[in-house]
Amino acid sequence: MRGTFGKFGKSAAARAALGIAVATGIAAGGFAPVAAVAKEKEAKGGKVSNSPEFVKAAQAFQPAFTAAQGQSGDAQKAAGQALVPQLAALQPNVKTPADQIIFGQWQQSVGNWVGDAALVRTGLQNMLDSGQLPADKVSLVQFFVGAKAYEAKDYAGAIKALQPVVAANYSDDVAAEMLAESYAQTGNPKGGLDALKQAIAARKAAGGVAPEAWYSRANRIAYTSKLNAESAEWGAMLAEAYPTPINWLGATQLVRNASAFTAQENLDLGRLMERSGALKADPKYVEREYVDYIQAADARRNPGEVLKIAQEGLAAGALKASDTFVADSMTQAKGRITADKASLPGLAKDAAAGANGVTANAAGDAYLQYGEAAKAEEFYKLALTKGGIDKDRALTRLGIAQADQGKWADAKASFAQVAGIRAPMAKLWTVWVDQKAAGK
């Protein structure tokens, strides 16, 4: 699995420097002029005034703040540094919510000028805690509080701030990733996966589409945390939402990694890779998958399928004709196909007469590898009726045979009955069947 934990490109927290004041509808640079500070603010069913203490202190602070606001670069940074102790001296005069939101804005602005992330975060938190933010701006400020907490590696603080933001389907997609990553960093990766599931549900409920990055983030968290079942689950979800060859390749690989598959399970997983397009991913990623598929199919048992897959691998540039394994497998397969096909009528006759489903199941396997899906379906059904076989294997292959005929509902019904070690793979087959049924 590739990807780097905790990196989100340009830091979302740094965007606070772009000016929370304008975005929240608060007058830029604080509440200038000072006369506005003393003005009463409408707030939630009543009026909130600035305290006399704050008004008096603000009259002394405001001119220097306004002057600094008009500067840029190093000059603004130097002016801001001079304001930091003045802010500290002014803080005891903050008495009312109206004082608090103004003071918080000043802290946020000065913090940005001097590059003090902690001061920016404190200012944002004061603005939020004042209760005076416009309702439609609360999530915006809360997001930046969470982003600053994440940037400071205060993951518990980030969780607290970002939970309501993500629940509200906040527009910045990185919020959900930071929340999930914060859970993971506090030793609770499953909490992070749950947070991303909730974010996806909220986005879909609002009529939107969850970004691919959310699924990828969850996938990396699960994989890195060695949560094999969850890793396979999120791989399937990613392939379901974004069915690209590389995503299908990852989904199938994760199911395999989470299971103790034998050659028989790997054969049916290889079949899913081939049908879903996973083997169309970059040749350097699928060379080993072609080899594994050929080994699982076994030229002695399924010569037709081995030859077909080997030829596909060569055409894709994933296999080389000069490779000894490839050359030997193809030679062996070619030498067995004629006799193998000639044996099919007799195998079918024996299947019908068999006391159990073993021969019928073998007949189904033989027809399936040659692409005769209707005949394969017939014999798998017979084998299941007679019994005495690996039921889950037969059901899996019955579903494959039905899917190969475009019998999507029947295939889903067959895959739904698969239990045991094959169940996660059957669920992944169902994802592919649903996509095909939807014309994807």
Image: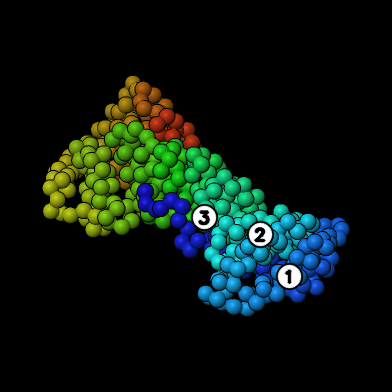
Q: Quadrant of residue 397?
A: top left
Residue 57 percent across, percent down from the top left: 75, 65
Q: Earlier in the sequence, mark 1 or mark 3?
A: 1
Q: Amino acid at mark 1?
A: Ala
Compare residues 71 and 219 and report the one nearer the observer: 71
Compare residues 286 and 101 and report the one nearer the observer: 101
Residue under numbered circle 3: 151
Q: Could you tell me how many numbered marks the image carries?
A: 3
Specify the color scheme.
rainbow
Query: At 59% from the left edge and 72% from the top edge, which residue is drawn?
Result: 79
Instruction: Say if residue 206 shows up in the picture.
Output: no
Between the C-alphas of marks 2 and 1, the distance is 13 Å
Query: At 49% from the left edge and 36% from the top edge, which residue is drawn?
Result: 416
Q: Amino acid at mark 3?
A: Glu
Secondary structure type for disc 2: helix
Between the C-alphas of marks 1 and 3, the distance is 33 Å
Q: Residues within 10 Å of mark 1 (few under 14, many from 20)?
A: few
Q: Which mark is residue 88?
A: 2
Where 242 sits versus 359, above or below?
below
Q: Amino acid at mark 2?
A: Ala
Residue under numbered circle 1: 60
Query: At 41% from the left edge and 43% from the top edge, which residue is drawn?
Result: 224
For residue 92, side relative to residue 169 (left or right): right
Query: At 33% from the left edge and 49% from the top edge, which residue is drawn?
Result: 274
Residue 98 percent across, percent down from the top left: 78, 61
Number of the front mark, 1 or 3? 1
